């Protein structure tokens, strides 16, 4: 089986994808500097602790033994932080990607799966949003992903480096059997925050209930992380089989309001979510739901998880296991 280099493979989505690739028999090498990822997410013999900025070391890793393709997860992902320190996001997300593609060109590796985001669309005028919607990011984080997508377009045209960009909607859930789940620090994502609120009794703040949506709270497209991992595996296979560059929405096409997620958490845990209503969070689109038909039509991808409660149940199982060994301060 081909050797695949995975950057950011110790992070949330990366680790689930690494696990899937290993199960499928790929020879995987993970590059992660562990500044936000966790070593315990990756088999130690697969992990190389390395900065993406180290182009020469990356080139060496890609060459010997030769890698057939790269999946590139390593990036900062916190929208709020990107508003405070945009330079960090351009240095890490854009600079890191530039270093990586330079290493790929030097090593003659010409296939890349790239972690993009629905944040490239900003506040889309039409939902469900298709890939034809214009780039209109409203944060340095979203802009950093747009910049890399554009860079990849030119690298294909000028240097023949083919890539698939997957624009993630709201990844959530876990693979507790594999010991994998969401462990951001600080955590900003809705599902783990709701589960933690249930467990600790500390209320979670709902960011606005006066949006123009049926219950007044924001609507998002929640996709199970294992389905997202599967999308990466399929995208990788397509590139290995010679498919051209493309960008795909990676979402389910189903929208859920914040209050619907709260209800799903209450059903799964059998407990009330302690909560309060707070002000809107700047930069939040009222509704962000994918039209995933391109990914379905081109690559045959379909989400395995279609019920939000099943997704939440996997996250709850992970949260309980994790809490048993590492209490939240
Ligand atoms: N949200 C919330 N309270 C929180 C965190 C998130 O009400 O403490 C809402 C947020 O406004 C959005 C949804 O939950 O509508 C998902 O937010 P998250 O940060 O998980 O992902 P994003 O949509 O920003 O990628």
Image (cartoon, rainbow, N blue to C red):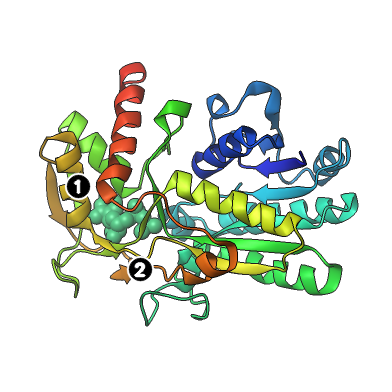
Residue lying farthest top? 325
- Does the numbered disc 2 mark a residue whose Cβ is under 8 Å from ligand 1? yes
Q: Kindly indicate whether the residue at mark 2 contacts the one at mark 1 (C-beta within 8 angstroms).
A: no
Q: Which corner quadrant holds the C terminus?
A: top left
Q: Quadrant of residue 24?
A: top right
Q: Which mark is residue 102?
A: none
Q: Closer to the camera, 149 or 142? A: 149
Is 63 on the left-hand or right-hand side of 94? right
Residue 329 visible in this rendered orientation of the protein: no
The secondary structure type at the circle numbered 2 is: strand
- State the residue position of label 1: 264
Q: Quadrant of ligand 1?
A: bottom left
| Res 258 seen here | yes
> Measuring 51% from the left and 55% from the top, which residue is drawn there?
85
Sequence-first disc among 1 and 2: 1
Q: Position of residue 163 (x, y in %)?
A: 70, 62
Indicate left or right for 276 with 115 as reference. Answer: left
User: Mark 1 Cα within 10 Å, few/some/many (few <14, many 20+)?
Assistant: many
Residue lying furthest left in this view? 272
Q: Position of residue 234 (x, y in %)?
A: 61, 53
> Image quarter for residue 34?
top right
Tag nearer the camera, 1 or 2 = 1
How dense is the environment of label 2, judged by Cα within 10 Å: few (below 14), some, or many (20 and up)? many
Image quadrant where one finds the N terminus: top right
Residue 176 in percent (x, y) is at 40, 29
Residue found at x 46% / y 49%: 227
Mark 1 to mark 2 CA distance (whole Å): 19 Å
The residue singled out by tag 2 in the image is 288
């Amino acid at each position: 089986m081909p050797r695949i280099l995975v950057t950011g493979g110790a992070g949330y989505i990366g680790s689930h994808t690494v696990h899937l690739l290993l199960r499928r028999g790929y020879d995987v090498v993970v590059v992660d500097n562990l500044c936000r990822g966790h070593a315990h997410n990756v088999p130690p013999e697969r992990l190389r602790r390395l900065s993406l900025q180290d182009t020469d070391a990356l080139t060496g890793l890609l060459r010997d033994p030769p890698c057939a393709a790269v999946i590139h997860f390593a990036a900062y992902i916190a929208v709020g932080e990107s508003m405070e320190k945009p330079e960090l996001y351009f240095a890490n997300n854009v600079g890191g990607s530039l270093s990586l593609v330079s290493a790929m060109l030097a090593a003659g590796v010409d296939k890349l799966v790239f972690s993009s985001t629905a944040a490239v669309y900003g506040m889309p005028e039409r939902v469900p949003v298709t890939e034809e919607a214009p780039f209109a990011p409203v944060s340095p984080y979203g802009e950093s992903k747009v910049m890399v997508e554009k860079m990849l377009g030119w690298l294909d045209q000028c240097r023949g480096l083919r890539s698939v960009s997957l624009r993630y909607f709201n990844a959530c859930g876990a693979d507790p059997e594999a010991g994998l789940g969401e462990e951001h620090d600080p955590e900003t994502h809705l599902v783990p925050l709701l589960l933690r609120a249930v467990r600790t009794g500390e209320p979670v703040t709902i960011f606005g209930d006066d949006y123009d949506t049926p219950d007044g709270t924001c609507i998002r497209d929640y996709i199970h992380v294992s389905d997202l991992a599967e999308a990466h595996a399929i995208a990788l296979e397509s590139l290995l089989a010679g498919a051209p560059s493309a960008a795909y929405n990676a979402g389910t096409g189903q929208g859920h309001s914040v209050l619907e997620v709260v209800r799903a958490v209450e059903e799964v845990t059998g407990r009330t979510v302690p909560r309060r209503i707070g002000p809107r969070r700047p930069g939040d689109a009222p509704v962000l739901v994918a039209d995933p038909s391109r990914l379905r039509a081109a690559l045959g991808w379909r989400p395995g998880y279609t019920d939000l409660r099943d997704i939440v149940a996997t996250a709850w199982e992970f949260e309980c296991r994790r809490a048993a060994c590492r209490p939240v301060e």
